[in-house]
Amino acid sequence: MHLLDRTLKRLVRHGTLTVHEPSGRTWHYGVAQPGWPDLGLRINDTKVTRFLALHPRIGMGEAFMDGRVEIEGGDIMDFIRFIRRNTPWEQPGDIDPPGWLHRTTKLIASRLDQFNGRNAARAHVAHHYDLDDRLYDLFLDANRQYSCAYWEDGVTDLDTAQIAKMDHIAAKLQLEPGMRVLDIGCGWGGMALHLHRIAGVEVHGVTLSKEQITYAKAWASREGVADKVTFGLTDYRDVPGTQDGGRFDRIVSVGMFEHVGAPNFGAFFAKCHDLLADDGVMLLHTIGRADPPGATDDFTRKYIFPGGYIPALSETVAASEPNKLMLSDVEILRVHYAKTLLEWYRRCVAQKRRIVEVYDERFYRMWLFYLAGAATAFEDGGLVNFQLQYVRSRWALPLTRDYIAANEAGFRTARQHSAGPAPVLERSATF
């Protein structure tokens, strides 16, 4: 307990935390302050304390998953938010233990995990995206967007925010009817279908998830556009040109670059360069870190996104520069993903019984820990979202950014005058 005592004294300054040992002894940390919670951490296993001290992120995650610790006075979101607020990105300090040995070990392990050859990449994608399809029905929006939404002023519901995200990306792509678009990491097909609906473009989406491909093809067929919106179970490194041997007018990639791995950044951008037409435009939407290049935390690597890595802007741009892709626009979305993740968390809590039915209590706790950790990393940690626009020709787009807002306004107007909302694939009938 003495190691954990030192750790909590370092982490908790505002608000109070009372730790209850199995022996009945209690430890108190922090100072009560207005606006800060008073929480309790009940430890049910004496073996937990040392691991919590040495490995706070994965230690807390595993202990919570197994029921070896319990949160009192709140839930796991309240607890992780409490710790994060005490160690915000804007101030010195970190949740992880200080020391070069810990940092070096973590960095090496993370880099080895990121090589992501074709077989490893397929396995890593299956680990997360080939989960029981009913799980995603329970917390995603109607368009199945499993990435950061775009919360415009006054927007309070997830579906509207996700449509705004897709419109925002479409606006930056400057689409025209008949253009051929490649969607790298197409997910369940929501973005590809949206781009076709609003702009009349032809889209080919690729992913490594068998579950996603099945879902996306069925969705396109249901909408009667399977000849215009197609999908393939293809590694980005193996994507051929268009059917007539040409290149794509536009490339979009949303929430996929986090799975590429730093050792493969150069290969990713080289492939995009080769697939993009001379006057083409590419939009890359990815989670990013405000810090310099770093490492993926142990909990995320083990349980959520094996092979995954959140890039720094510096290493992303450095990898694109040698490939003759001109960075034409950069936008940093700061708190948008926090709002998105908080809504996903709320929905999962409301659907606890159904999630436990599909999996079990331990999975449910793991999923909540993942969502809570991610949400607070965007609220008070060093995570943001990058939207990076690339061109091969400096003349490919208007010279000012006015066209982005104009395109978005046009999409909104067209939607207001349409016969009804865009069709979506029906929810699973299982629930």
Image (cartoon, rainbow, N blue to C red):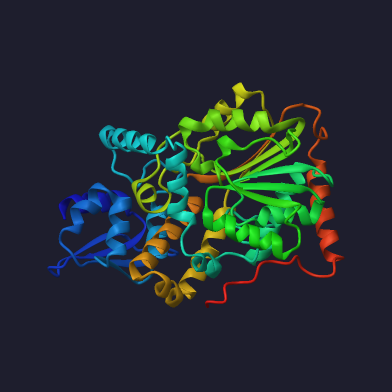
Residue 13 lies, in percent from the top left, at 33, 54
- Image position of 188 with respect to 278: above or below: below
Q: Is residue 65 left or right of residue 293?
A: left
Q: Position of residue 64 (x, y in %)?
A: 30, 63
Left/right of residue 13 with respect to residue 284 in the rendered view: left
**Residue located 56% across and 56% down the image:** 212
Residue 200 in the image: x percent, y percent? 82, 51
Query: Do we see residue 153 in this rendering?
Result: no
In the rendered structure, the answer to whether residue 322 lies left or right of residue 378 reads right
Could you say which is closer to the camera, residue 234 or residue 42? 234
For image coordinates 55% across by 45% down, the residue present is 256
20 or 230, which is in the foreground?
230
Image coordinates for residue 209, horizontal then vertical, percent: 52, 52
- The residue shown at (79%, 52%) is 408
Q: Is residue 54 visible?
A: yes
Q: Is residue 316 left or right of residue 116?
A: right
Residue pictured at 76% horizontal, 58% vertical: 225
View extreme (left): residue: 23
Question: Of 21 and 165, which appears nearest the observer?
Answer: 165
Q: Quadrant of residue 364?
A: bottom left
Identify the image quadrant of the N terminus. Answer: bottom left
Q: How many marks?
A: 0
Nearer to me, 244 or 415: 244
Q: Give the residue furthest to the right.
A: 417
